[in-house]
Image (spheres, rainbow, N blue to C red):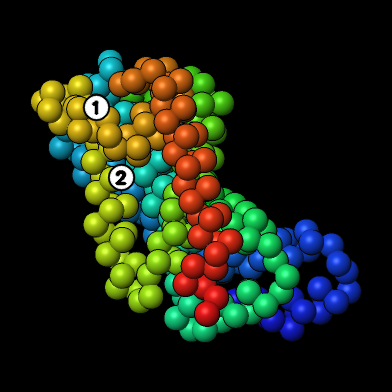
């Protein structure tokens, strides 16, 4: 946590409202960066293990959209890492501050709820992007060296960046909601294990929804994370299960709705101010 004396001192020296946002954003960045082995290296290693296991079992037997399975898997693992880590950053920071009582040092400075929201969501998106980039570098580099004919490439970088940013921001906002709602760590764990984890694992990370029975294809289309994974994957191969424009519209609409709900809760001080 940032030193409260630093926050008060900075506030006294300058009335610039951006200083509060910058200080909180810096605090959130340092919080995950100082434990990088846990917050960055560990999820990259987990994604690498997923790739090694699933590729060993299925590569050579399965091709999706004309792409080898080992290459098809990489964008899904990277985007799943972006989403899960963006959620974890915002939610764990907020619940930790509430449980330890240090949230008061964030609420005392004259930060607006917009500053609070922007600092937490932006830091969450940055952590998601850092982990996602790490997954792409490690898994993509391994595949490029061992299987140069696997067909892994980057067809449309703009789509990749757009879905990674929007997806990370959406999950960061969702993490703020979970952090505000939860009073204990096990409530937050329930939110993560029974909502976030199933939505990300059943979103097409490991398969195309066209390989599912028609009923489950329809169910998958109600999962917003499916559109994040599918649109992100389109940026690599130029093919996807649904039109990338539709995926972008769903993800953008989801982010705007989640952000509006989160801002309304922050404005009320829901479970933050007594």
Towards the viewer: 204 or 267: 267
Q: Secondary structure at mark 2?
A: helix
Q: Residue at x 69, y 81 (%)?
A: 4
Residue 180, disc: none
Residue 208, disc: 1
Residue 234 image offset from top left, x and y in percent: 41, 23
Residue 172 image offset from top left, x and y in percent: 49, 53
Towards the viewer: 206 or 12: 12
In the picture shown, does residue 101 fall above or below 45? below
Q: Is residue 96 in sight in this rendering? A: yes
Task: Name the residue at the right extreme.
Answer: 13
Towards the viewer: 250 or 75: 250
Q: Is residue 200 left or right of residue 19?
A: left
- Of the numbered discs 1 and 2, the one sitting upstream in the chain is 2
Task: Name the residue at the front extreme.
Answer: 268
Q: Residue at x 48, y 77 (%)?
A: 98
Q: Quadrant of residue 118?
A: bottom right
In the picture shown, does residue 60 fall above or below 103? above
Q: Residue at x 43, y 53 (%)?
A: 174
Q: Residue at x 30, y 21 (%)?
A: 241
Residue 143 image offset from top left, x and y in percent: 36, 34
Q: Is residue 268 left or right of residue 68?
A: right
Residue 180 image offset from top left, x and y in percent: 45, 67
């Amino acid at each position: 946590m940032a030193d409260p004396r630093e926050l008060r001192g900075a506030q006294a020296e300058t009335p610039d409202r951006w200083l509060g946002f910058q200080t909180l954003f810096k605090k959130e960045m340092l919080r995950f960066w100082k434990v990088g082995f846990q917050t960055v290296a560990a999820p990259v290693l987990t994604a690498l293990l997923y790739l090694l296991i699933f590729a060993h079992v299925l590569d050579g037997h399965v091709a999706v959209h004309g792409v080898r399975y080992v290459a098809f898997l990489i964008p899904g693992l990277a985007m799943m890492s972006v989403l899960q880590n963006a959620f974890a950053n915002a939610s764990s920071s907020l619940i930790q501050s509430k449980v330890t009582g240090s949230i008061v040092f964030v609420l005392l400075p004259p930060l607006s709820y917009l500053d609070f929201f922007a600092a937490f969501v932006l830091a969450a998106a940055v952590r998601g992007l850092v982990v996602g980039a790490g997954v792409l570098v490690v898994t993509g580099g391994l595949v490029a060296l061992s299987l140069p004919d696997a067909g892994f490439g980057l067809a449309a970088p703009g789509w990749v960046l757009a879905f990674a940013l929007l997806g990370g921001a959406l999950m960061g906002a969702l993490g703020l909601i979970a952090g505000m709602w939860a009073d204990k760590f096990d409530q937050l764990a329930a939110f993560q294990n029974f909502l976030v984890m199933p939505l990300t694992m059943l979103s097409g990370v490991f398969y195309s929804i066209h390989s599912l029975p028609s009923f489950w294809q329809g169910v998958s289309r109600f999962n917003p994370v499916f559109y994040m994974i599918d649109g992100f994957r389109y940026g690599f191969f130029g093919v996807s299960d649904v039109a990338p424009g539709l995926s972008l519209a769903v993800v953008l609409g989801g982010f705007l709705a989640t952000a509006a709900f989160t801002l309304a809760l922050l404005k009320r001080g829901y479970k933050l101010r007594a």
